[in-house]
Image: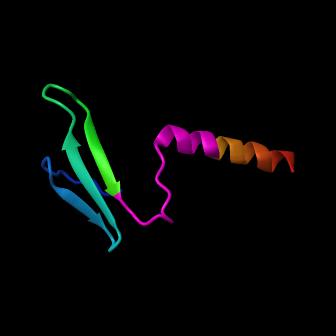
Amino acid sequence: MLTVTVKEGQKLYIGDDIIVHLHHDSIGSRQVKLSVDAPEDVTILREKLKARLDSGNSNNTQRN
């Protein structure tokens, strides 16, 4: 895992096709916004949704 520290407004490049933009949500907030520019064929999921989908896939696999 790579951990990087970036300042607001900076970009993180992943390969040639993916750009992650960091935006601070608001003053005093502990949240940041990530904007991702990626090709349409790249799937981007929040952790909760991925876990839900993975759980559903394992349930389907167990039934077969």
The quarter of the image holding the N terminus is: bottom left
Quarter of the rendering containing residue 38: bottom left
Magenta segment: does it hold 20?
no
Direction from residue 16 to residue 26 in the image, left or right: left
In the rendered image, residue 2, in percent from the top left (x then y), is placed at 31, 57
- Residue situated furthest bottom in the rendering: 16
- Residue situated furthest right in the rendering: 64
Quarter of the rendering containing residue 13: bottom left
- Residue situated furthest front in the rendering: 40
In the rendered image, residue 20, in percent from the top left (x then y), is placed at 29, 56
In the rendered image, residue 14, in percent from the top left (x then y), is placed at 32, 66
Please give the name of the residue rendered at 32% of the width and 74% of the height, measured from the top-left corner: 16
Please give the name of the residue rendered at 22% of the width and 54% of the height, measured from the top-left corner: 4
Where 16 sits versus 53, above or below? below
Where 29 sits versus 59, above or below? above
Number of marks present in the image shown: 0
Magenta segment: does it hold 45?
yes
- Residue situated furthest top in the rendering: 28
Q: Which residues are magenta?
A: 37-53
Please give the name of the residue rendered at 85% of the width and 45% of the height, measured from the top-left corner: 63
Please say which color scheme the image uses: rainbow
Please give the name of the residue rendered at 20% of the width and 58% of the height, measured from the top-left corner: 11
Direction from residue 60 to residue 38 in the image, left or right: left
Direction from residue 7 to residue 61 in the image, left or right: right
Direction from residue 22 to residue 54 in the image, left or right: right
- In front here: 45 or 63? 45
Where 13 sits versus 24, above or below? below
In the rendered image, residue 41, in percent from the top left (x then y), is placed at 51, 66
